[in-house]
Structure formats: structure tokens, C-alpha cells
Image: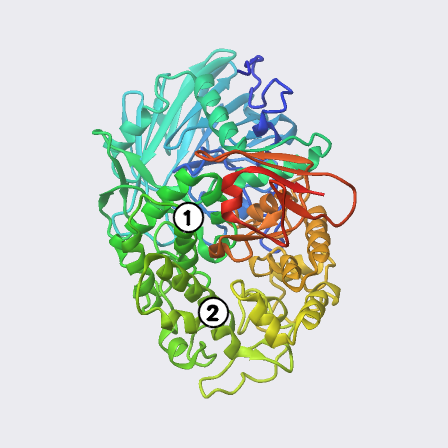
Amino acid sequence: MILWTMLALVCSCAKSSSESHDFVTYVNPLYGTLSNSSFSTGNTYPATARPWGMHFWTPQTTQSLRDGWIYSYYKENLRMYGFRQTHQPSPWMGDYGQFSIMPFTGEAAGIPSSAFSHKSEESRPYCYSVYLADYDCLVELTPTSHAAAFRLTYPESNVSGFRVDADGEIQIDGKRIYGTSSLNRGGVSENFANYFIIESDTGFEAVGDNVFVFKTSKGQVVNLSVASSFVSFEQADLNLAEVAERDFDTIKEEGHNEWNELLGRVAVSDDRKVDEKKIFYTCLYRSLLFPRDLSEIDGSGRRIHYSPHDGKVHDGYLFSDTGFWDTFRSLFALIDWVYPETAMAIQEGLVNHYLESGFLPEWGSPGHRDCMIGNNSASVVAEAYLKGLRGYDIDTLWEALVKDAHSVEPVSNTSGRRGWEEYYRLGYVPSDIGVKESAATTMEYAYDDWCIWQLGKALGKDGLEEYEKASQNYRNIYRPEYSMVSGKLSDGSWNGELNPYKWGGDFTEGNAIQYTWSVFHDPDGLMELMGGKEAFEHNLDQIFDLPPFYDDSYYGFQIHEIKEMTVMNYGNYAHGNQPAQHIAYMYNYCDKPEKTQFRVSEIMRRFYTAGPDCYCGDEDNGQTSAWYVFSALGFYPVCPASCEYALAAPLFTEVNVSVPGHRALNINTKGDAATKKASINGHKLGTIIKHDDLLKGGELSFR
């Protein structure tokens, strides 16, 4: 066990050992925080949390509690306004239930804030600390899933204290503060509230606007225990036991160990590539934050959750704060493979979403939200079951998939399928019926129907012909003269001339050049439409070889996703947005694996950096991170529910993957040649590896 060494007034967030198995030391939560609304290098905030925890904590470098995270923590803002409990999954979605705590010294006038330096800041997944220069105060915090411990080291001062920023009523009972926050941007029921308790080990006097003061001597430590619940104050009091009257360093050590165990399931042994390991483990950390587990343990030991759909308390798991349009592509493939115990809980949570709202979520935060397109819950459900996960009510999930394919959620109008009647009747979603981004929607529905078809076969269901046929609906919007898909009107005519460079319109945050390749389930069919392997390869080459031209007339300005594509100088390949992220792997299907290996290696090298500008666009709930994790291992789930992965070449010389209940998989590569060939336990592979082969373990070798 690694020993802790505490230095006076210095946070011991970083482990005091160079042991190579301390994987968490490679994680830097500040990666991706050099972002703003016009240019994203991740749009991340430094989330201090437990894996999939109900509450995250983050430093706040802007005054308003209502600011989204683009401004909540920006790497170049050097003034601290508080430490926020946050549940925000996306800057475009908004936070909910947030409140913050800000220590200070001196007269409590106005809103306290302090200068700070990144040189006196420590950010780790399991703890955060910073020195508040204006107040000569060191702040340290470490969280659990439902609570957090604060250790505040004050100077000698007649007036020291902290301010609580929340929108609800605050009451005092001895050394306890009880408060509520009902802040939200939608996706909650009318009775929604976050009930929080702050317990101080030092007596205080309440003054002014939620300010709590006391006298301190030099170096005096004040400990705060903080917990909250979406159920009640009584439940928040139960959650407080995770930290109350417990040693700060012990809680921190537990957080370190939990993160280290989960990160260590994918153990990189290559010590030559330090920066790459930092990127890798930071990406793996980001892949283990969302979806958020909203469940709590009540006084009888039952797992319960507050439902954002009906405002009631129910038994069991509920996960939220993720957009399936982003994360179905590879995040859930990673969780299903390496963290199956969490994956099964997520599926149980999806059952509860359906039972409580009548629909599966497509973008949940925490309830149904109107954002993005598709019916990609079909992929998330089908993939988990087809990859062998069990122990949850798959029959109810099947019922949900069939219902969602033939209806629309009436309140938010986002879950289910918009335009489903025309889609099944005409074989595509028309551009003139008021359904936005119709061509992209058609492409995703076709894949979703393929997922339903595959799951239905595995479950022995009848009446699957509709889904089998609809899985080919991408063909109905393919325009041979352009070798691309295009929007189509209700009368069967095309929606005008196709401008391949035009973003938006019939497409979602992308253009026809990119979205044509969203045939995850049938690359051979797409190849046939294009005229064979050579044409398929040529069209892939064009994506990377074209100048980064674009047409932003649909938006009326250059959206940040377009800017992030152009500055990378890699043609019309837009890795900063999810619809393009599988494209480099498509060369495998036209027998050009060397091009997949070259492109994927280039993307890892050029598009990800070990610094605050880590990403080349929005990180998006772990998806852009999971792409890097898979690609660094040497394969990627182009079609997640197929239980197959397209091969590339590993980034590291050796990685050991340990999945509970399965033999470990050792991934190793040798040789300097650009092109690698793979084998599993001595058996040669082509361009694909199956999920069962990963679970069987052994040696996956690249030579």
C-alpha cells in the first residue's frame, strides 16, 4: 500500500510514490478546460468525484452560480468564487441542483472571491486543493458518491468563515446548515429539489446573506462535512454518514483506491510514452464519470432514487446525464466490456426510466431533454444484451424499444422517434414535415432498426421483418451522382441540389461528406452503392484530402464545431464532433487496413494533447475520450451492437486488461513498421476482432 506523507498546509492530492501501478497519478482533470463558447478544447470542467458519482465538485472561477461550465471553470480565469456541487453533463444542457461554498477571511461584504495560481492548485479525480491568496486560506476537498469533506486551513483572523450560495431557503440548527437548491434548466418534475446539509466541526455565527463566521488562530483547520439528496433532508442526513466524523485523509485514500482500481483494469506498461499515458488515463477517467448514478441507499439498506419523471421515490438504480447521440458510439462499448457490473446497473436504470416515464431517454439530464436526434437507446440496450450482460428485465426493455420506434414522447418531444410514421411508410424521414436534420435522422433510425432486429432475433421475437427492411432505409436517401446521402422531400424528389460542404440543414452538426458514412451496420451495402472497393476507398480518401471547406449558411455563423474542423487542417474530417469519429476505421472494410492504422495514429497524435487544450472539440460525456481509449488499445466498435471491433494498431507496447470474471487480455505490439497484423492466441486475425475473443483473454499480438 502506498503511504501518504502530509506536508504542512499542502494538499497531498498527488501520491508520494513513483510506483508505476499508481495509474491515477497520470490523470489530469484540468485537461480540456481551455475552452470557451466559440472554441472547444473539450468543454470539460475539473470534476472531483467518485466514478459515476451522484454529485461532482468543481472549482468555480466565475461569480454566477448559474453560469454553465464553459465559464464556470476556465483555465485563464485566475479568480476563485467558490466550490460548486454540480450535476452538469454539458454546457449546452445546463446544471441542476447546484450550490457552492466559498471560504474567506475579513469582513464579509459582498460576494467573496480570491486570486489564485495554478501553481498552488492540485486537481485529482478524488481530491482538489487550492490556496486562496487574498484570504491566506488553503481549501481541500475530497468527495464520496453522495457527500464531500472539506478541510479549510485559516490564518489568524478575528473574522473567518464561508459563504453558501444557493437559491433556496437556508436554516441553521447548531453546527448544521440545511438548504435546498431547485435550480435547473428543465428535465425535472415540479417538486424537484436538492436537499443539502453542511456540518461544521467549529461553531459559527450566521450573518448577512448566507454567511457563517468564526474566529480562527494561525493554521486552524475547520472541517466541513457536506451531503445532499434528491429525496429529502432525512436521506441527506443518511448520506452524510459517508464523511461525517471521519478522517479527511482516510476518505481521500478511499477515493484514490477506488479510482486506481477501476483505472487499473486497463494497465498500460509502456513507460516510454509519458504524455500519451497522461492522455490515456485522463480519457479513461472521463469515460467513468457519466452516466451519473442517481440512486441512494435509504435507512433500511434499500437502493432508491428520486424520479425526475413523476417526482416520486422508487426502488432501484437510475442513471442519467448522458446523450446517447454522442455516447452510443463507443462509451457504452467500453463500460459493457471492462465494467460489466456498472453496465448491468445502467440497464436496470433504463428499465426504471421506461416504467416511470413511458419512454427510454435519448438525452437525459436528469429527465428527458430536447437535444440532438436519433433513437440510439436501441443501440445501448441491444449492445449490452448481445454482449452477454444479464440480470435485468430485458423483456421490459424490448417492449420499450418497440414502443419508442413507433411513438414520440409527448412532453419534451425528444424521446421516441420524430417522423416515425413517414419513416416507415416512405422509407425515410422527409425534409418537409418539420423534423429537423432529416437525412441524419434517417441514417440513425436505420441503424437503430438494425439493432432492434438483431436483439429481436436473439430474444426469439416474431414480426421482425419491419426492422430488417427498415435497416436498409439509408439506401433511399443515397444520391449516386454525388456518392453521398441527401435530404429528400415527401413526394420523393430531392431537397434541391446537394452542397456537400453545407453543415446543418438535413444533417446534424455535420455535412453530407461526413454523415454518408453513418452506415455502421452495413458497410458492404454502402460500398455496393458507391460502386465497389476502389470507389469506397477513393471517397474515404477525399474526406481527408479535401481542403477544410465549409458552408455555414444554415447557422448564419461559424459554429464552434466548424472552426474546430478547419484549424486542424485534416480535410473535411471533423473529429471534434461524433458523427465522424468512426470514419478512419472504414478503410478496413475495403481491405485497406494500413490506411486505417495510419489515419488513426495520426488522429491520436495530432488531435489529442497532454495539456489544457487536450481535445479537438467537445469531450461529450466520455465519447471523445472512449474513442482514444479504444484506439490506443488497437481497435474500435464501429458498429457497437455487432459485437465486433475494427482493428487498427496499439499505441503502447503492452497493455493488460482485467475484466471481472474473465481471463486477462494482454495486448502487445512489436516492430517499427507502420502496418501491423494481428493475432489472438496464435490465430491470425483479419481486420476484425470479436467481443467474445476479448472476453476469452490471452494474447492479442500485433506484429
Please state which of residues 61 and 538 is positioned toward the viewer in this rendering: 538
Q: Can residue 448 be seen here?
A: yes
Tell me the quarter of the picture where residue 318 sits: top left
Query: Furthest-right residue in view?
Result: 672
- Category of crowding for the residue at label 2, using alpha-carbon neighbours closer than 10 angstroms: few (below 14), some (14–19), many (at least 20): many
| Residue located 39% across and 54% down the image | 381
662 relative to 431, above or below: above
| Residue located 42% across and 74% down the image | 469
Proximity of marks 1 and 2: CB atoms separated by less than 8 Å: no
687 relative to 45, above or below: below
Q: Position of residue 423 (x, y in %)?
A: 41, 76
The first of marks 1 and 2 along the sequence is 1
Residue wearing tag 2: 441
Label 1 amino acid? Asp
111 relative to 693, above or below: above
Q: Position of residue 379 (x, y in %)?
A: 43, 57
Element carrying mark 1 = loop
Label 2 amino acid? Thr
Q: Position of residue 458 (x, y in %)?
A: 37, 57
Residue wearing tag 1: 321
Q: Nearer the viewer, mark 1 or mark 2?
A: 2
| Residue located 73% across and 53% down the image | 598
Q: Position of residue 387 (x, y in %)?
A: 44, 49
| Colour basis | rainbow
Q: Is residue 372 left or right of residue 2?
A: left
418 relative to 427, above or below: above
